[in-house]
Amino acid sequence: MDLKNIMQQLGSNPQIMQMQQKMKQAYQDMHKRHETETISASSGGDMVKATVTIKGSLVSLDISEDLLKEGSAVVSEMVVAAVNLAKDKAATKSQEDMSKLAAELGLPSGFGGF
């Protein structure tokens, strides 16, 4: 059962409605931050650095001039590794933020994905 269904079952209690609005606003604020907040990861001893938003969009990719001399297969491998690592870190950060938000709103454990 998701949060929307729970709220519908509780009816239109003003306190519940206020809590629902607070939760909705907090989630929207976090979602908006995740569109611009970035996280980076490197591969190949910092020869490639990928930066993504917390939502997972690639916003920059820095490749060392020295690495470019190694050939396309090596460059590709390092780029993929850096991008995947950055996206994994972003997903972890997103989940941590959701769990933190749920705790701040007084929701029980497991509501991090509301």
Image (spheres, rainbow, N blue to C red):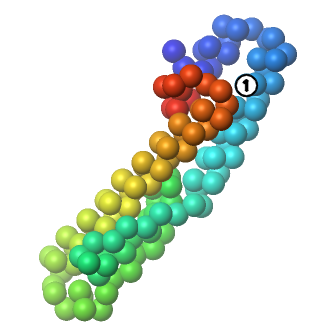
Label 1 element class: helix
The percent coordinates of residue 71 (x first, y second) are 15, 85
Q: Which three-letter amino acid code belongs to the residue tagged 1?
A: Gln
- Other-residue count near label 1 (Cα within 10 Å), few / some / many at <14 / 14–19 / ≥20: some
Seen in the picture, residue 70 relative to 2 is either above or below; the reply is below
The percent coordinates of residue 69 (x first, y second) are 19, 91
The percent coordinates of residue 11 (x first, y second) are 74, 8
Q: What residue is shown with label 1?
A: 20
Q: Say which residue appears at 32% left-offset and 60% top-offset.
A: 85
Residue found at the far right of this picture? 14
Q: Say which residue appears at 70% left-offset and 8% top-offset.
A: 10
Residue 77: image quadrant is: bottom left
Q: Is residue 70 left or right of residue 86?
A: left
Indicate the quadrant containing the C terminus: top left, top right, bottom left or bottom right: top right
Q: Say which residue appears at 76% left-offset and 29% top-offset.
A: 21
Residue 84: image quadrant is: bottom left
Seen in the picture, residue 87 relative to 108 is either above or below; the reply is below
The percent coordinates of residue 64 (x first, y second) are 31, 87
Q: Say which residue appears at 61% left-offset and 38% top-offset.
A: 101
